[in-house]
Amino acid sequence: MFCFKFTKSYKFNVILRIFLIFALEMKKSFAEILQQVERGRLMKLQHKLPSWACVPGLVLPSDLCLEQCSSEATARYKASLIGSPASVADLTGGIGADCWAFSKHAEKVLYFEQNPELAAAAQSNFSRLGAGNIQVSCTRTDESVIGSLPSQDWIFLDPARRDGAGRKVFLLEDCTPDVLTLLPAIWQKTSHLMLKLSPMADIPLIAKRLGSELEQVHVVSSEGEVKELLCILSKGNSKPYGITVSMLESGSVLNFSPCDEQSAQSIAADAPEEGKYLHEPCAALLKAGAFRLPCTLWGLGKLAAFTHLYISDAPLPENASAFFKTYRIISAGQMSGSAVKSFGKAFPKADVSARNIPMTSEQLRSKLKCAPSNDGTHIFACTAGQSRWLIAGKRVQ
């Protein structure tokens, strides 16, 4: 039977009391509630780290550590970027998902974590997972700790993105540890550094702060969301950095540079018409800043400079389809009060999006009075050329 070992903490005691109250009110035994909690955690673990879920006796100190850790897919992706090095040091180990993935490639992995509860859990888990080449240290990462390291082929850092009050932070210097402060010490110990940053971080700003040693930015997408923003830095690098958009489910990859986007020509789309194809870029493509590039790469027409929707006469080529949601246009017309009423009656069930107009998607839905779609119908209200348009389309799988 799969089981979790609960560690003693103040938070756990509070949760325990809540469970007892619920048990009395709902007339359930404490054992039944514990079984529900265990099943819930197991389901989360199966979704996020399926290879761990079949290993009995793993220690997970809290639901939070499971929520904040890398998924198995993103951990394996990071590990694929380092090749087969002799040594890797993970200076912000957490529950150890990334270290575990690194250990599949590297001869030796050094794990550092300042939280004793997490470090103890990771050490126990690594043993049960058969990751015998990971050395665990419970210590806070600072210049002195880095200075005591032997030389490493790679160093990995995933700075905490919350301040002392628990608020989210996005600037590098506000994260813990402060990577910018540690960089001089890091370059004394390695030539390759990987940083995991917030998916909300601004790439041009990050590039400016990290300087010329930034070699590559990876925008990693899974389940339709940008899951991770990875920065690869190389000591002494002097070439402009590149951007990689990786779609984990499909395995599709797009490589380009900021210069490619700057030199790309935006092609103005013809007026939306029934039978044409409308393409909505995925979150990762937008995060990477590829706005004009789809026009150059795949011959798409852009509805307007700040309307990130594209039109084509034919379906997308296979190498592009993973980066877009594509709709076959079934109705289109310039936006007006009567057009909104007409579209609402014609499409009583449709998903809606407002793009580059002074209206939110919720306000648009309220005006259209349509329910969510169950068949892939979508209505876009957007600026196209110099006018505002309503475009209804049916999702093309």
Image: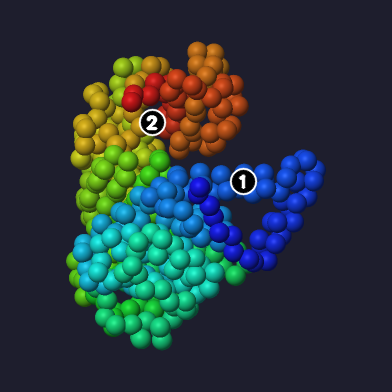
Element at label 2: strand
Q: Which quadrant would residue 252 be assigned to in this image?
A: top left
Q: Which quadrant would residue 348 be assigned to in this image?
A: top right
Q: Name the residue under label 1.
A: 35
Q: Residue furthest right?
A: 25
Is residue 259 toward the left or the right of residue 23 in the image? left
Which residue type carries mark 2? Ala
Quadrant (top left, top right, bottom left, bottom right) of the C terminus: top left
> Which is nearer the N-term, disc 1 or disc 2?
1
Q: Is residue 393 above or below residue 156?
A: above
For image coordinates 53% across by 24% down, the residue present is 372
Is residue 163 toward the left or the right of residue 378 in the image? right
Residue 223 percent location from the top left of the image: 40, 41
Residue 227 in view in this figure: no
Q: Name the residue under label 2.
A: 384
Residue 385 percent location from the top left of the image: 36, 32
Residue 341 percent location from the top left of the image: 55, 17
For image coordinates 38% across by 31% down, the residue present is 384
Work out whether residue 326 or residue 142 is closer to the camera in this orientation and state it. 142
Q: Distance between the residues labelled 1 and 2?
A: 55 Å
Work out whether residue 197 or residue 12 is closer to the camera in this orientation and state it. 12
Q: Residue furthest front?
A: 1
Which circle, 1 or 2, is nearer the viewer?
Answer: 1
Q: Is residue 297 above or below residue 89?
A: above
Residue 298 percent location from the top left of the image: 21, 36
Element at label 1: helix
Work out whether residue 305 or residue 293 is closer to the camera in this orientation and state it. 293
> Which label is found at residue 215?
none
Residue 190 in view in this figure: yes
Q: How many marks?
A: 2
